[in-house]
């Protein structure tokens, strides 16, 4: 089988729509978590839900309650909970932490959000071999697909290939767009362009707290190098 790995949409419906228009008809879809934490949560969830059995969901850290929150994050979380029905949120919290699929050319492939060990554990392009080896110590699959750190990479260590699919809705790639991966038989990194001005208007039309901050992230994204440095440092300090 062929799989489109769609990670970290973060409630960015216009970006998701653009990507879905490019996903080949014969590809299955894995939603890699952090689906709705962002400006258009309900619509984003509904759009993926409409795809039915074609989608396998993996839960991300932002798809579950991570409280207690500081003031700023509490406002965001309360806003999010006011958008989603309790049923929708319960459904998301019940998504599995990992999904395994057999992909053409890549073999048994483990999909997770952060790492195979947890949705908050970050793997970056510059994670040391030593740390990566420890993270992968329980893995029996040939390929691991992760997200969470919002930048694409493809690394192989001890015959396990680790692919970060990138982020559709909030990429740290230095260049705007929706980033995802098409898997099987190769690993094909994709960048899909979408209308940023229209997306910004759609975000402003919501009641999302801090819309301008989110729009800024989409129009002037951090570089992958910068994100990897910051996120790797946090991981080394034991921070989520
Ligand atoms: Mn995440």
Image (tube, rainbow, N blue to C red):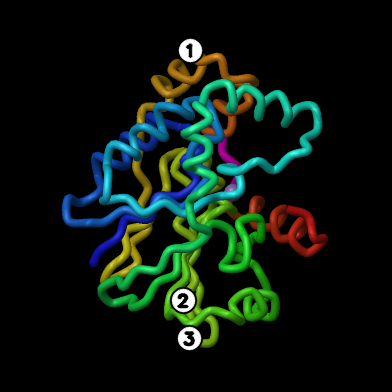
Direction from residue 236 to residue 57 in the image, left or right: left
Asked if one can make out residue 240 in the rendered structure from this viewpoint, the answer is: yes
Residue 13 screen position, x and y as percent: 40, 30
The residues tagged by marks 1 and 2 sit, at their Cα atoms, a distance apart of: 41 Å
Q: Can I make out residue 175 in this image?
A: no
Q: Is residue 227 above or below residue 2?
A: above
Residue 182 in the image: state x and y as whole percent: 32, 59
Q: Which residue is mark 3?
A: 159
Residue at position x 30%, y 60% in the image: 3
Residue at numbered disc 1:
205
Q: Upstream in the sequence, badge 1 or badge 2?
A: 2
Q: Indicate the secondary structure of the residue bearing disc 2.
A: strand
Instruction: Kindly check if marks 2 and 3 are in contact, taking CB atoms under 8 A apart as contact.
Output: yes
The quadrant holding residue 207 is top right
Vertical placement of residue 228 versus 209, above or below? below
* Residue receiving disc 2: 161
Q: What's the magenta region?
A: 219-223
Q: CA distance from mark 2 to mark 3?
A: 6 Å
Pick whichever of labels 3 and 1 is earlier in the sequence: 3
User: Residue at 80% across / 60% down in the picture?
Assistant: 238
Can you give x and y, in whole percent of width and height, for residue 134 in the image? 67, 79
């Amino acid at each position: 089988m062929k799989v489109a790995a769609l990670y970290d949409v973060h409630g960015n419906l216009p970006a998701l729509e653009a990507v879905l228009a490019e996903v080949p008809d014969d590809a299955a879809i894995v939603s890699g978590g952090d689906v709705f934490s962002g400006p258009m949560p309900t619509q984003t969830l509904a759009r993926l839900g409409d795809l039915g059995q074609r989608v396998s969901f993996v839960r991300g850290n932002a798809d579950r309650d991570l409280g207690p929150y500081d003031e700023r994050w509490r406002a965001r979380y309360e806003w999010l909970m006011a958008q989603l029905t309790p049923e929708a949120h319960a459904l998301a919290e019940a998504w599995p932490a990992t999904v395994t699929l057999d992909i053409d050319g890549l073999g048994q492939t483990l999909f997770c959000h952060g790492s195979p060990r947890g949705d908050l554990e970050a793997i970056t392009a510059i994670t040391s071999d030593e740390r990566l080896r420890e993270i992968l110590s329980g893995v029996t699959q040939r390929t691991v697909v992760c997200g969470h750190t919002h930048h694409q990479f493809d690394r192989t260590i001890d015959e396990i290939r680790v692919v970060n699919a990138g982020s559709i809705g909030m990429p740290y790639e230095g260049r705007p767009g929706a980033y995802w991966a098409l898997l099987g038989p190769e690993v094909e990194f994709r960048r899909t362009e979408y209308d940023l001005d229209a997306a910004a208007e759609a975000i402003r039309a919501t009641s999302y707290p801090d819309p301008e901050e989110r729009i800024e992230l989409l129009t002037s994204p951090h570089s992958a190098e910068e994100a990897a440095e910051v996120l790797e440092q946090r991981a080394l300090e034991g921070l989520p």
